Amino acid sequence: MTVYAVDSATDAQHPWRFGFIVSKAVGNAVTRNRVRRRLKAISYRVLHGELSPMDDRDSALDIVFRAHAPAAAADFSVLQDQAVSLIARASTRVRSQEPRS
């Protein structure tokens, strides 16, 4: 799985937005939708504080998950652990970058 993250200009109540890319390389429609539903469940848990990959929730982020073929065979817990660590790593990189002028 790959995660892309950028700063966003959304309101303070809902600072994070999530997107999902699950191509046909992952599997048939049933498999792709299962992977997407799992990623949506993980995103929901992150948004509601059940999973906390970072301390600073004030800044807005747009996060896009791109699922690869092995995600179809991964257990939910493995997918969740990987997603949380990727979100944390991507968000620290975004926050450490210099602001664009």
Image (spheres, rainbow, N blue to C red):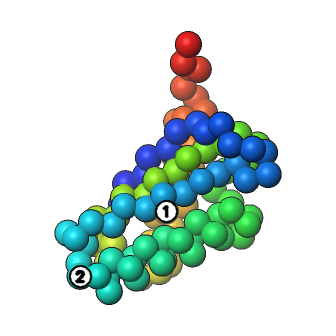
Left/right of residue 60 with respect to residue 20 in the rendered view:
right
Q: Residue at x 71, y 70 (%)?
A: 50
Q: Nearer the viewer, mark 1 or mark 2?
A: 2
- Which residue is situated farthest in the top direction here? 101
Q: Residue at x 54, y 35 (%)?
A: 94
Label 1 to label 2, Cα distance in Å? Answer: 22 Å
Do the residues under discs 1 and 2 have CB atoms within 8 angstroms?
Answer: no
Q: Is residue 31 above or below residue 6?
A: below
Quarter of the picture holding the C terminus:
top right
Left/right of residue 79 with respect to residue 73 in the rendered view:
right
| Badge 2 amino acid | Asn
State the residue position of label 1: 83
Task: State the image coordinates of residue 17 (x, y, percent, origin top left).
Answer: 59, 53
Q: Residue at x 23, y 78 (%)?
A: 27
| Badge 1 amino acid | Ala
- Which residue is situated farthest in the right direction here? 13
Task: State the image coordinates of residue 25 (x, y, percent, origin top left).
Answer: 20, 69
Q: Give me the disc on residue 28.
A: 2
Count of numbered circles on the image: 2
